[in-house]
Image: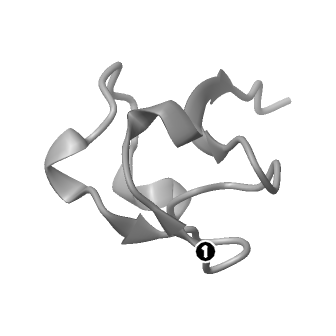
């Protein structure tokens, strides 16, 4: 599963269910508040994609 990570806090930037298995950052949703720290994320430079392995 792909997870959008907020670079500043290191936590998930959005709820896991809203990104699913896509390979693109939802740029039409900027700005939005980080799911973990609630700080505003202005653009894609503040996030990174990470792949989590569900074992």
Residue 13, percent from left and from top: 58, 57
Residue 32, percent from left and from top: 37, 68
Residue under pointer 1 = 39
Residue sitting at x 49%, y 32%: 45
In the rendered view, would you say 6 is above or below 36? above
Residue 48, percent from left and from top: 59, 29
Residue 12, percent from left and from top: 67, 55
**Under tag 1, what secondary structure?**
loop
In the rendered view, would you say 14 is above or below 54? below
Residue sitting at x 38%, y 46%: 19
State the colouring used for the structure image.
one colour
In the rendered view, would you say 48 is above or below 30? above
Asked where in the image residue 7 lies, by quadrant, the reply is top right
In the rendered view, would you say 1 is above or below 16? above
Give the left or right position of residue 35, taking residue 40 as reference. Answer: right
Asked where in the image residue 35 lies, by quadrant, the reply is bottom right
- Mark 1 is surrounded, within 10 Å at the Cα level, by few (under 14), some (14 to 19) or many (20 or more) other residues, namely some
Asked where in the image residue 5 lies, by quadrant, the reply is top right
């Amino acid at each position: 599963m792909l997870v959008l990570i907020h670079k500043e806090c290191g936590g998930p930037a959005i709820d896991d269910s809203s990104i699913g298995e896509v390979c693109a950052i939802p740029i039409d949703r900027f700005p939005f508040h980080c799911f973990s720290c609630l700080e505003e994320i202005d653009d894609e430079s503040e996030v990174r994609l990470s792949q989590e392995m569900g074992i």
